[in-house]
Image: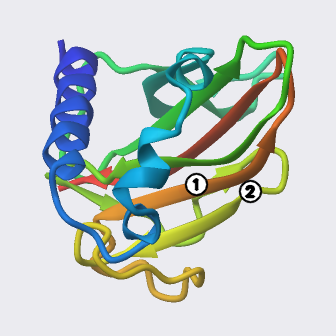
Amino acid sequence: MIKKLLTVTLLVSLLLHADMPTVNYDNQFDNEEMSQIDETMLSSLKLESLVFQEKLVDGADGKKIKKNVPVKQVKAGEKVVYINRILNTNSESKRNIVVKNPIPYGTEYVVDSAVCDHGCVISYSVDGGETLSNTDTSGEGYNYIEFHFKQIPANKELRMGFRAIIQ
Protein backbone atom coordinates (compact mmCIF):
# COMPACT_ATOMS: atom_id res chain seq x y z
CA MET A 1 0.00 0.00 0.00
CA ILE A 2 2.77 2.44 0.96
CA LYS A 3 4.70 1.52 -2.21
CA LYS A 4 1.66 2.41 -4.30
CA LEU A 5 1.14 5.62 -2.33
CA LEU A 6 4.78 6.67 -2.78
CA THR A 7 4.69 5.77 -6.48
CA VAL A 8 1.46 7.75 -6.94
CA THR A 9 3.00 10.67 -5.01
CA LEU A 10 6.04 10.60 -7.31
CA LEU A 11 3.85 10.47 -10.42
CA VAL A 12 1.57 13.26 -9.17
CA SER A 13 4.63 15.34 -8.31
CA LEU A 14 5.97 14.73 -11.82
CA LEU A 15 2.67 15.89 -13.31
CA LEU A 16 2.50 18.98 -11.10
CA HIS A 17 6.06 19.96 -11.93
CA ALA A 18 5.57 19.27 -15.64
CA ASP A 19 3.29 22.32 -15.96
CA MET A 20 5.53 24.65 -13.97
CA PRO A 21 7.53 27.17 -16.02
CA THR A 22 11.24 26.71 -15.53
CA VAL A 23 14.29 28.79 -16.24
CA ASN A 24 16.45 25.84 -17.08
CA TYR A 25 16.66 23.58 -20.13
CA ASP A 26 13.00 23.78 -21.13
CA ASN A 27 13.27 27.47 -22.05
CA GLN A 28 16.39 27.04 -24.19
CA PHE A 29 14.33 25.95 -27.19
CA ASP A 30 11.74 27.99 -29.04
CA ASN A 31 8.45 26.59 -30.33
CA GLU A 32 9.79 26.06 -33.83
CA GLU A 33 12.64 23.88 -32.60
CA MET A 34 10.28 21.96 -30.33
CA SER A 35 7.91 21.25 -33.22
CA GLN A 36 10.75 19.51 -35.05
CA ILE A 37 11.17 16.85 -32.35
CA ASP A 38 10.32 13.44 -33.73
CA GLU A 39 7.71 11.88 -31.42
CA THR A 40 8.99 8.40 -32.32
CA MET A 41 12.30 9.37 -30.71
CA LEU A 42 10.57 9.85 -27.37
CA SER A 43 8.39 6.76 -27.69
CA SER A 44 11.48 4.53 -27.76
CA LEU A 45 12.41 5.62 -24.22
CA LYS A 46 10.69 3.80 -21.37
CA LEU A 47 10.91 5.19 -17.83
CA GLU A 48 10.03 3.21 -14.73
CA SER A 49 10.10 4.54 -11.16
CA LEU A 50 10.53 2.16 -8.24
CA VAL A 51 10.48 2.70 -4.47
CA PHE A 52 12.29 0.51 -1.95
CA GLN A 53 12.78 0.52 1.78
CA GLU A 54 16.22 0.16 3.36
CA LYS A 55 16.20 -2.73 5.83
CA LEU A 56 18.81 -4.56 7.88
CA VAL A 57 18.62 -8.28 7.17
CA ASP A 58 20.70 -11.28 8.19
CA GLY A 59 23.40 -12.10 5.65
CA ALA A 60 24.59 -15.62 4.81
CA ASP A 61 27.32 -15.26 7.45
CA GLY A 62 24.82 -14.16 10.12
CA LYS A 63 25.92 -10.51 10.03
CA LYS A 64 23.42 -7.73 9.43
CA ILE A 65 23.54 -6.17 5.95
CA LYS A 66 21.56 -3.33 4.33
CA LYS A 67 19.16 -4.46 1.66
CA ASN A 68 16.56 -2.69 -0.48
CA VAL A 69 13.21 -4.45 -0.15
CA PRO A 70 9.84 -3.54 -1.65
CA VAL A 71 8.05 -0.91 0.43
CA LYS A 72 5.36 -2.33 2.68
CA GLN A 73 5.08 0.13 5.53
CA VAL A 74 7.36 2.99 6.51
CA LYS A 75 7.54 5.18 9.58
CA ALA A 76 8.97 8.62 10.21
CA GLY A 77 12.75 8.48 10.24
CA GLU A 78 13.07 5.45 7.95
CA LYS A 79 14.95 5.61 4.66
CA VAL A 80 13.44 4.89 1.28
CA VAL A 81 15.29 4.49 -2.00
CA TYR A 82 13.89 5.89 -5.24
CA ILE A 83 15.24 4.21 -8.37
CA ASN A 84 14.40 5.23 -11.92
CA ARG A 85 15.20 2.99 -14.86
CA ILE A 86 15.25 4.38 -18.38
CA LEU A 87 15.41 1.99 -21.32
CA ASN A 88 16.25 3.00 -24.88
CA THR A 89 14.40 0.41 -26.99
CA ASN A 90 15.62 1.93 -30.26
CA SER A 91 18.53 0.70 -32.36
CA GLU A 92 20.03 4.21 -32.22
CA SER A 93 21.49 6.15 -29.29
CA LYS A 94 19.45 8.98 -27.79
CA ARG A 95 21.22 12.22 -26.93
CA ASN A 96 20.67 14.99 -24.38
CA ILE A 97 18.03 13.27 -22.26
CA VAL A 98 16.91 14.86 -18.98
CA VAL A 99 14.97 12.94 -16.34
CA LYS A 100 13.20 15.34 -13.98
CA ASN A 101 12.53 13.92 -10.53
CA PRO A 102 10.70 15.86 -7.82
CA ILE A 103 11.53 14.68 -4.32
CA PRO A 104 8.19 13.50 -2.90
CA TYR A 105 6.45 15.66 -0.33
CA GLY A 106 6.86 14.25 3.18
CA THR A 107 10.41 13.09 2.54
CA GLU A 108 13.80 14.73 2.96
CA TYR A 109 16.64 14.12 0.50
CA VAL A 110 19.72 12.38 1.97
CA VAL A 111 22.91 14.34 1.17
CA ASP A 112 25.25 12.71 -1.38
CA SER A 113 22.82 9.89 -2.08
CA ALA A 114 21.96 10.69 -5.71
CA VAL A 115 23.68 8.38 -8.21
CA CYS A 116 23.35 7.54 -11.88
CA ASP A 117 24.82 5.31 -14.59
CA HIS A 118 26.82 6.25 -17.63
CA GLY A 119 28.38 9.44 -16.28
CA CYS A 120 25.27 11.56 -16.12
CA VAL A 121 25.29 15.00 -14.53
CA ILE A 122 23.01 15.50 -11.53
CA SER A 123 21.42 18.88 -10.74
CA TYR A 124 19.68 19.85 -7.51
CA SER A 125 17.05 22.45 -6.68
CA VAL A 126 15.35 23.93 -3.62
CA ASP A 127 12.64 25.67 -5.66
CA GLY A 128 11.07 22.92 -7.74
CA GLY A 129 13.54 23.20 -10.62
CA GLU A 130 13.40 26.96 -11.12
CA THR A 131 17.13 27.20 -10.39
CA LEU A 132 19.58 24.32 -10.47
CA SER A 133 22.98 23.60 -8.96
CA ASN A 134 25.38 20.82 -9.90
CA THR A 135 26.74 20.74 -6.35
CA ASP A 136 25.23 18.59 -3.61
CA THR A 137 26.67 20.56 -0.71
CA SER A 138 24.04 20.64 1.98
CA GLY A 139 21.05 18.68 0.73
CA GLU A 140 18.96 20.86 2.99
CA GLY A 141 15.67 21.79 1.42
CA TYR A 142 16.25 19.99 -1.90
CA ASN A 143 12.88 19.19 -3.45
CA TYR A 144 13.84 18.42 -7.02
CA ILE A 145 16.62 16.56 -8.89
CA GLU A 146 17.44 16.34 -12.59
CA PHE A 147 19.56 13.63 -14.19
CA HIS A 148 21.21 14.80 -17.44
CA PHE A 149 22.39 12.10 -19.85
CA LYS A 150 24.57 13.12 -22.81
CA GLN A 151 23.73 9.83 -24.44
CA ILE A 152 21.66 6.72 -23.81
CA PRO A 153 23.09 3.92 -25.98
CA ALA A 154 20.86 1.81 -28.22
CA ASN A 155 19.00 -1.00 -26.47
CA LYS A 156 20.53 -0.03 -23.12
CA GLU A 157 19.00 0.44 -19.68
CA LEU A 158 20.42 3.07 -17.34
CA ARG A 159 19.57 3.64 -13.68
CA MET A 160 19.50 6.65 -11.44
CA GLY A 161 18.23 7.23 -7.94
CA PHE A 162 18.49 8.76 -4.52
CA ARG A 163 17.64 8.15 -0.88
CA ALA A 164 15.19 10.06 1.27
CA ILE A 165 14.04 9.97 4.87
CA ILE A 166 10.34 9.79 5.70
CA GLN A 167 9.30 12.86 7.74
Label 1 near label 2: C-beta < 8 Å? yes
Q: Which sits earlier in the primary sequence, circle 2 or circle 1?
A: 2
Q: Is residue 162 visible?
A: yes
Q: Position of residue 102 (x, y in %)?
A: 31, 52
| Residue plotted at (60% across, 26% down) | 85
Determine whether, in the image, residue 5 is placed left or right of residue 62. Answer: left
Mark 1: give few (<14), some (14-19) or many (20+) Cα within 10 Å.
many
- Which residue corresponds to mark 1? 147
- Residue 1 lies, with reference to residue 166, above or below; the image says above
Distance from label 2 to label 1 (Cα)? 6 Å
- Which residue corresponds to mark 2? 120
- Indicate the quadrant containing the N terminus: top left, top right, bottom left or bottom right: top left
Q: Is residue 164 visible?
A: no
Report the amino acid beneath label 2. Cys
Q: Position of residue 17 (x, y in %)?
A: 20, 51
Q: Position of residue 79 (x, y in %)?
A: 39, 46
- Residue 46 lies, with reference to residue 33, above or below; the image says above
| Residue plotted at (37% across, 68% down) | 27
| Residue plotted at (36% across, 75% down) | 125
Closest to the observer, 66 or 38: 38
- Indicate the quadrant containing the C terminus: top left, top right, bottom left or bottom right: bottom left
Q: Judging from the image, what secondary structure is the residue with disc 2 in?
A: loop
Q: Position of residue 66 (x, y in %)?
A: 63, 36
Closest to the observer, 164 or 152: 152
Determine whether, in the image, residue 141 is placed left or right of residue 53. Answer: left
Report the amino acid beneath label 1. Phe
- Residue 115 lies, with reference to residue 152, above or below; the image says below
